[in-house]
Image (cartoon, rainbow, N blue to C red):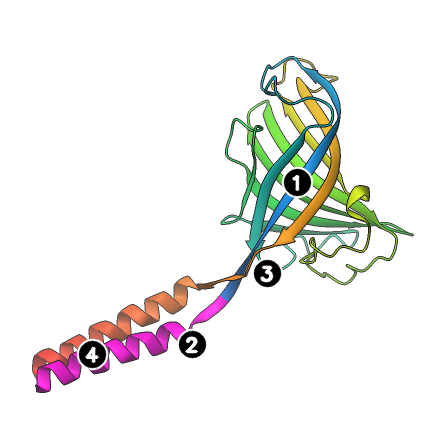
Amino acid sequence: MKTLKHYLITAAASCLFCATSVNATILTWDFTVTVDTIYQDNANVIDDSITVGTVLSGSFSYDNGLTDDSPDFDYADGYLDPNGSFTIAGLGIYDWSISASVVHQSSRDIVDVEGDYWSGNIHESVEIGFLDYSQSYDNGVLPVNWHNPPVPFSDIEFDYTLNLGTDPCCYDSWLSGYVSSIELRSPTDVPEPSSLILVGLGLIGLTRKVKVS
């Protein structure tokens, strides 16, 4: 019974650590975009079913605790999340990394979230963004209100491009459109890696105590 008691204490302590070590929240937005222009598809990566008027669906996610990774540039704030994601049905042949950015201009901000892939001359990108004349993201404010932006959804632009490096002046494939809807999923709490290490160390210590007892 004494051994069982120690195991119960261990389990309870583990749960306590888990409950108090959550420091990051992953935000995920589901969106739809309407294609209004297909410029060209020389790379043959845009599905034939995608035409002007087609509604595409996708999602993107990143940590709501990201901080500006370009603090030396007063005119721009950048937020790269190596664990984030950006996907859109029917587009994309590579795995994209995700970043958010706010470029500050005299009378407006350019607000973007982008998924992109770079390898040599190959660059594939999908981007959602808008012009914010209210400049609501000054002073390093991370955009986390895509579902409730300061502009109508129809004013938020969407672009998909693929550059294979074969033509120095133009994209090999390119289409654009506008956002139809963006919805925020229920946030997901994720323990920080350092907290998980502490949990592990706590379990090791308690297990040794059980063995000694």
CB within 8 Å, label 1 to label 3:
no
CB within 8 Å, label 2 to label 3:
no
Quadrant position of residue 67: bottom right
The Cα–Cα distance between marks 2 and 3, rounded to whole angstroms, is 18 Å
The kind of residue tagged 1 is Thr
The first of marks 4 and 2 along the sequence is: 2
Quadrant position of residue 55: top right
Question: Could you tell whether 65 is left or right of 53 in the image?
Answer: left
Label 1 or label 4, whichever lies nearer to me, is 1
Question: Residue 208's x, y, as percent?
Answer: 14, 77
Range of magenta residues: 1-23
The Cα–Cα distance between marks 2 and 1, rounded to whole angstroms, is 36 Å
Task: Please name the residue shown 73% across and 23% down the image.
Answer: 52
Q: Which residue is mark 1?
A: 32
The Cα–Cα distance between marks 3 and 4, rounded to whole angstroms, is 34 Å
Say the numbered circle drawn on residue 206.
4
Assign the N terminus to one quadrant of the image: bottom left
Q: Which residue is mark 2?
A: 20
